[in-house]
Image: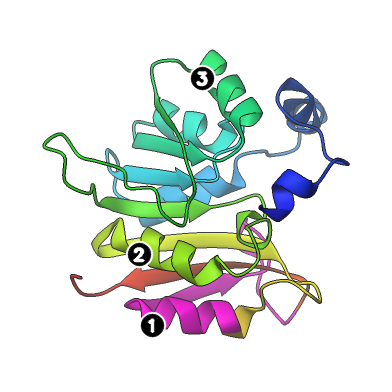
Amino acid sequence: MSRWAHRRDVPRGADYDQRWARKAARGESIHGEADLVASLVRPGGSVLDAGCGTGRVAIELARRGYEVVGVDADRTMLDHARNKAPELSWLHGDLASIVVAGETGERRCFDAAIAAGNVMIFLEPGTEAAVVANLAAHLRPGGALVAGFQLSDGYLQLHIFDALAERHGLTLESRWATWEGAAYAGGDYAVSVHRKLTAG
């Protein structure tokens, strides 16, 4: 079972969205993730929102003209995303094993896969390698895996994440301390872009 499923101290569904609504009401930017993806992917490109939650990032990317598929293992979060944007594609599944199919049934490849909201450290322990492998398999050559997560003892560490990415054909391209592009200098949060340079 994922670490997220074990958490009972975090809001879900509409309650989860209230955090972002309050930030927006204060005039704070709540779309740093979408801004970053938009800087990496051509307009009209495709994005897999891995661990999409209530759909905040996916819905904003769709609003900007991107083709988006959201995947999450939490039905409560996913149902809320569907209620907000029923026209988008929302899939329930495990990031370690789900296959997002294209129109003819084959695995679909995206211009980017984004894992925001600490997705990588909320996975079921021991599945991190399988998740990175599966996300890499859903990227076209030239596609980018974009992931941001907290760096804490007992959770996935950057050097492990980088090694997993490299094992599956992804090369570290950029790293920041925030989604807004602040320089990374070894802090407790990192946003990484790994690029898939070859097919396979």
Asked if the magenta segment contains residue 143, the reply would be: no
- Proximity of marks 2 and 3: CB atoms separated by less than 8 Å: no
| Label 3 secondary element | helix
Type of the residue with mark 2: Ala
Within 10 Å of disc 2 (Cα), the crowding (few <14, some 14-19, many 20+) is many
Q: Is residue 26 above or below residue 100?
A: above
Read off the magenta span.
160-186
Q: Which residue is mark 2?
A: 136
**Count of numbered badges drawn on the protein:** 3
Image spot of residue 138 (x, y percent): 30, 56
At a point 74% along the width and 32% down the height, the residue shown is: 20
Q: Nearer the viewer, residue 200 or 33?
A: 200
Image spot of residue 104 (x, y percent): 11, 37
Asked if the magenta segment contains residue 180, the reply would be: yes
| Label 1 secondary element | helix
Nearest to N terminus: mark 2 or mark 1: 2
Type of the residue with mark 1: Arg
At a point 60% along the width and 40% down the height, the residue shown is: 31
Type of the residue with mark 3: Arg
At a point 73% along the width and 71% down the height, the residue shown is: 155
Horizontal arrangement in the rendering, residue 109 relative to residue 178 (left or right):
left
Q: Nearer the viewer, residue 99 or 160?
A: 99
Q: Which residue is mark 3?
A: 82
Nearest to N terminus: mark 2 or mark 3: 3
Q: Quadrant of residue 156?
A: bottom right
Q: Which residue is mark 1?
A: 167
